Image (cartoon, rainbow, N blue to C red):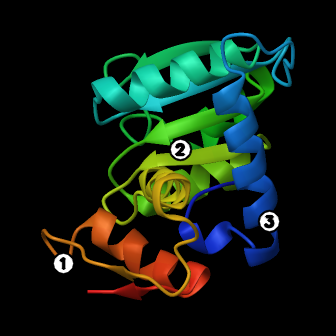
């Protein structure tokens, strides 16, 4: 998987390996010598601020041996005064990957298309795939596989999180209410 822009981007066959690696990194996070991001720099581009998301990605990148550069809406002209494809092309030559938290899903898709680097959706108005993937992982840790279970979503049924839950229900074979 080159980009993670949507739950739809995850191939069902990749999920067990993704979750196995996540469990391994989580278990060994303080003592692991594995540094798959050693020598890599990731850009964290946040048009929408978030303490938990920013810190989670910065710490994760650091613990995997990489460096993170944080750019907020005041630092970057993503879609304001500079074309997204131009920003993507420049940053794609400078960073090894991008984590983006922004408004329009089309903005992150355009960035991924023109940057040439792996791009991760940390939240858009349409989807919140990292949150849902981590929720499914946590449910698996606490309750066993989510397949066949019933998950109840309480909240705005038209929000980004709800849309990602709908996609996840089909991907992970659970009922969503």
Q: On the image, numbered disc 2 is attached to which residue?
A: 84
Question: Of residues 102 and 153, which is closer to you in this image?
Answer: 153
The mark that comes first in sequence, 1 or 3, is 3
For label 3, the SS is helix
Q: Can you tell which of label 1 and label 3 is closer to the viewer?
A: 3
Q: On the image, numbered disc 3 is attached to which residue?
A: 14
**Residue at figure coordinates x 48%, y 52% from the top left:** 138
Task: Give the percent coordinates (x, y) of residue 96.
Answer: 78, 27
Question: How busy is the neighbourhood of tag 2: few (under 14 within 10 Å), some, or many (20 plus)?
Answer: many
Left or right: 26, with 12 as reference point: left
As drawn, 40 above or below 80: above
Q: How many marks?
A: 3
Task: Give the percent coordinates (x, y) of residue 82.
Answer: 47, 35
**Residue at figure coordinates x 67%, y 20% from the top left:** 29
Q: Can you tell which of label 2 and label 3 is closer to the viewer?
A: 3
Task: Give the percent coordinates (x, y) of residue 56.
Answer: 47, 26
As drawn, 169 above or below 137: below
- State the CA–CA distance, disc 2 to disc 1: 30 Å
**Residue at figure coordinates x 86%, y 20% from the top left:** 34
For label 1, the SS is loop
For label 2, the SS is helix
**Residue at figure coordinates x 50%, y 75% from the top left:** 168
Left or right: 27, with 16 as reference point: left
Question: Of residues 12 and 82, which is closer to you in this image?
Answer: 12
User: In the rendered image, which quarter contains the C terminus?
Assistant: bottom left
Left or right: 157, with 137 as reference point: left
- State the CA–CA distance, disc 1 to disc 3: 28 Å
Q: On the image, numbered disc 1 is attached to which residue?
A: 157
As drawn, 5 above or below 81: below
Mark yes or no: residue 156 visible. Answer: yes
Quarter residue 153 falls in: bottom left
* Circles 2 and 1 in contact, beta carbons < 8 Å: no
């Amino acid at each position: 998987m080159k980009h993670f822009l949507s739950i739809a981007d995850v191939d069902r066959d990749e999920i067990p390996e993704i979750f196995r690696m996540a469990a391994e990194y989580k278990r060994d996070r303080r003592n692991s010598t594995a540094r798959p991001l050693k020598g890599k720099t990731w850009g964290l581009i946040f048009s929408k601020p978030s303490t938990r998301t920013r810190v989670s990605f910065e710490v994760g990148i650091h613990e995997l041996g990489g460096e993170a550069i944080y750019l907020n809406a005041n630092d970057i002209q993503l879609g304001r005064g500079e074309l997204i494809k131009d920003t993507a092309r420049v940053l794609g030559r400078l960073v090894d990957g991008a984590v983006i938290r922004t408004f329009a899903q089309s903005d992150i898709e355009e960035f991924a298309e023109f940057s040439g680097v792996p791009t991760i959706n940390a939240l858009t108005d349409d989807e919140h795939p990292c949150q849902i993937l981590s929720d499914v992982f946590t449910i698996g840790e606490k309750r066993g596989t989510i397949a066949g279970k019933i998950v109840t979503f309480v909240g705005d049924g038209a929000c980004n999180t709800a849309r990602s839950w709908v996609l996840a229900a089909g991907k992970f074979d659970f009922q969503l209410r």
